[in-house]
Amino acid sequence: MEFNKNTLAQTMAFLLSIPPESNLAKLLKLCLVTQYNGENLGQNALEKSQELIINPTDLPYWIQEVIQSNDKITPEEWQAFGQLNLTQTQDFINTLLEELNNLKL
């Protein structure tokens, strides 16, 4: 994937717009600390991310696969996972989608 300066600026603007305590921020933090190894799952990071977008209610399974992709779980990954507080997946996803819709870019 070719990554240019405009894409970087758009990504940074997106990240700067996210409230730090939102569900979206918590999910992205997990993504940042995860040591994803797509070779073990046969999917690169974009393919794995698209899988979640297609089936957001599979979030708990998606997280488990992503975290365990390198055959070890770090303390940072456990901490980020715990901060998600996934007691009701559908509620978490609904809130996350609402937060995404309310972003002001």
Image (cartoon, helix red, strand yellow):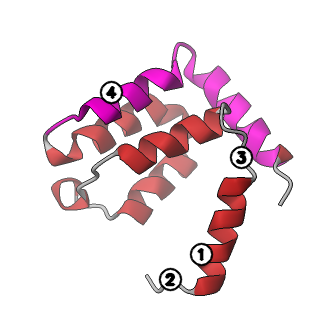
Is the residue marked by circle 2 packed among few (<14), some (14-19), or many (20+) residues within 10 Å?
Answer: few
What number is the disc on residue 8? Answer: 1
Residue at the extreme top of the image, as rendered:
87
Whole-Å distance between the Cαs marked 4 and 3? 22 Å
Tag 2 and tag 1, C-beta contact below 8 Å = yes
Residues drawn in magenta: 72-101
Residue at image mark 4: 78
Characterize the magenta stretch by its predominant secondary structure: helix
Q: Amino acid at mark 3?
A: Ile
The numbered mark, 4 or 2, whose residue comes first in the sequence reads: 2
**Residue drawn at 53 percent across, 13 percent down:** 87
Whole-Å distance between the Cαs marked 4 and 2? 30 Å
Residue at image mark 2: 3
Tag 3 and tag 1, C-beta contact below 8 Å = no
* Residue 104: x %, y % from top left: 86, 54
The numbered mark, 1 or 4, whose residue comes first in the sequence reads: 1
The numbered mark, 3 or 2, whose residue comes first in the sequence reads: 2
Tag 4 and tag 3, C-beta contact below 8 Å = no
Circle 3 — which element?
loop
| Residue 74 sits above or below residue 31 on the image | above
Asked whether 75 falls inside the magenta stretch, the response is yes
Whole-Å distance between the Cαs marked 3 and 1? 16 Å
